[in-house]
Image (tube, helix red, strand yellow):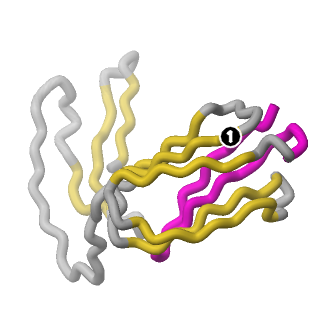
Amino acid sequence: LYWWHNSSQGTGYLRLKTMGGTILYNFEPEFGRFAEYEFGIGAITSTKEVGETVFVNVYPNPVSEYIHIDILGMENEQLTIRLATSMMVTVFERSAVVNNPDFSTAINVGYLPSGIYLLQVEYGDKTIVKKIVKK
């Protein structure tokens, strides 16, 4: 959809174009009125289903001793929780099977130096990443 309007000249245009730039439809240049155009999409080559949403809550952040991780909306999944430095050096890793839609765990980070860390929760072919600040 391409649109141009110059109010000082009282002119403009509204066009529906393909990704290649071919103009599919020119709307009337009279602005201030309603325009409606219906079109269909042919040859759909793939679809992706939207699954249930998984929420990962990490607290407290910034953290001194223990970081608490709540994972909601995941059930009967194998997951890996990994904590890495900002240089992607793994300092903690734990695997678990989630049998309950409300999974919680805690990680002792008191021994780690202050800095920025990345908490990764991997399950299936997905990864959720949260930034952690260690005081």
- In the rendered structure, the answer to whether residue 38 lies left or right of residue 23 reads left
- In the rendered structure, the answer to whether residue 2 lies left or right of residue 34 reads right
Rendered view: 95 above or below 128:
below
The x, y position of residue 106, in whole percent, is 60, 48
Residue at 12% x, 39% y is 35
Splitting the image into 4 quarters, where does residue 89 fall? bottom right
Q: Main secondary structure of the magenta part?
A: strand
Which residue is nearer to you in this view: 48 or 40? 48
Q: Secondary structure at mark 1?
A: strand
Splitting the image into 4 quarters, where does residue 68 fall? top right
The x, y position of residue 63, in whole percent, is 71, 33
Which residue is nearer to you in this view: 126 or 111? 111
The x, y position of residue 56, in whole percent, is 48, 48
Residue at 76% x, 48% y is 117
Q: Label 1: how many residues lie within 10 Å, few (<14), some (14-19) or many (20+)?
A: some
The x, y position of residue 118, in whole percent, is 71, 52
Residue at 30% x, 61% y is 23
- Amino acid type, mark 1: Tyr
- In the rendered structure, the answer to whether residue 26 lies left or right of residue 58 reads left
Residue at 79% x, 64% y is 90
Most extreme residue toward the top, as rendered? 8
- Magenta region: 112-135
Residue at mark 1: 66
101 falls in the magenta region: no
Which residue is nearer to you in this view: 100 or 82? 100
Rendered view: 34 above or below 75:
above
122 falls in the magenta region: yes
Which residue is nearer to you in this view: 34 or 104? 104
Task: Tell me the quadrant of the picture where the C terminus can be found.
Answer: top right
Most extreme residue toward the right, as rendered? 113
Rendered view: 20 above or below 43:
above
- In the rendered structure, the answer to whether residue 116 lies left or right of residue 27 reads right
